[in-house]
Amino acid sequence: MLTLLGLDQHTETVYRAMLAHPGDGVSALSERLDLPEDIVRHSLDQLSELALVRPSYDAPGRIHAVSPDVGMEILLARQRAELAAQQQRIEASQVAAARLISEYAALRPDAGQPGVEHLTGLDEVRDRIAALTRDIKEEVMIFAPDGEQTPENLEASRPLDEAVLKRGVRMRTIYLDSVRNSPHSTAYAEWLGKLGRQARTAPTLPLRMIIADRAAAIVPVDSGNSAAGAVVLTGDGTLTALCALFESVWENAKPFGEKPQRSGDSLTDTELTALKLLADGHTDESIAKRLGVSHRTARRIATTLMERLGARSRFEAGVQAVRQGWLT
């Protein structure tokens, strides 16, 4: 019954017996359950590791079984922590897979591998995006990690976006949180929202990407240089991984109209992400690029965080952040 919570059959049996007969020791439990004493001791060791038994305060030398209401909450909390850690590993794997896919495709431009089309130069990339957009029938998913867009770029995108949405295509876009600080970007997002486009924001994004009808994805060869070209990926396995990556980021992103939330330490999502990058040794330039903000803004955020932590170096900031519970 409790195997899903980490208890095997013998361990659960011993736990139940201890609850029903709190005065039993190892010998009594062994006789009552008709189990060898080594199995009973092994079960007690497992119960101790799971914090379901502890030394008795009333009877020194004896072991006390924690009540089920407390014990089950301990087991459930343990499982929630394991699930959260597993989800983090999955998300990290998806990001790594997406990067590897684009890097591998860039390394073999002449291999002619199936499911990969190479685009050279910014003009060719934009032409291919326009053609792909015209053919979209059901859904388009977009990572937009560029930060604030110029009014000219947004105006140029308006006819294409409007045409897609008026065809009834479902459009979902994830921006960087920093876009919220741009009045013209916010106005453009609100205009698209009235046409049915859904938008969310995240502190950072793994790469720039457009997925059309879950059948084709365009990713840049060099995320820092759009002019370097891009690849169009159409392989089933590749698209499955990229769609899963998008859905994972979308699930954790904030709706565009929702105000940035602060953690218990009064950190915004952007500040918390900057702190993680700071602790990992990233430069102000690298932090600025990942957050989609100016170099000056990134430096200001980093300086403010270090002052709040009383740290004189980035390494010390990471240590202090862990000590104060800001980072795990």
Image: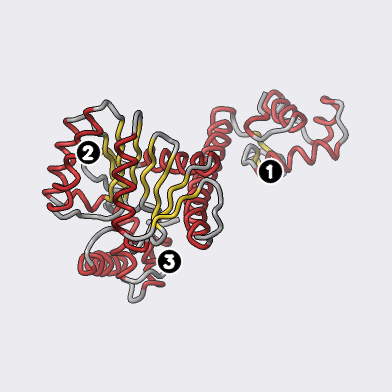
Task: Find the distance from the CA under tag 1 to the CA under tag 3.
Answer: 47 Å
Front of the two marks 1 and 3? 3
Q: CA distance from mark 3 to mark 2?
A: 38 Å
> Residue 261: where, in percent of width, then height?
26, 45
- The numbered dot on residue 280 is 3
Q: Is residue 179 above or below residue 307?
A: above
Provide the secondary structure element on which disc 3 rests: loop
Q: Nearer the viewer, residue 307 or 166?
A: 166
Quadrant assignment for the C terminus: bottom left
Q: Tell me whether circle 1 and circle 3 mark residues in contact (CB < 8 Å).
A: no
Quadrant assignment for the N terminus: top right
Q: Nearer the viewer, residue 186 or 30?
A: 186
Q: Label 1: how many residues lie within 10 Å, few (<14), some (14-19) or many (20+)?
A: few
Q: Earlier in the sequence, mark 1 or mark 3?
A: 1
- Residue ID for mark 1: 60
Image check: 54 left or right of 116? Answer: right
Q: Amino acid at mark 2?
A: Asp
Furthest toward the bottom, the residue is 312
Q: What is the number of the mark on residue 161? A: 2
- Quarter-of-image position of residue 215: top left
Q: Residue at x 26, y 38 (%)?
A: 199
Q: Mark 3 near mark 2, Cβ–Cβ under 8 Å?
A: no
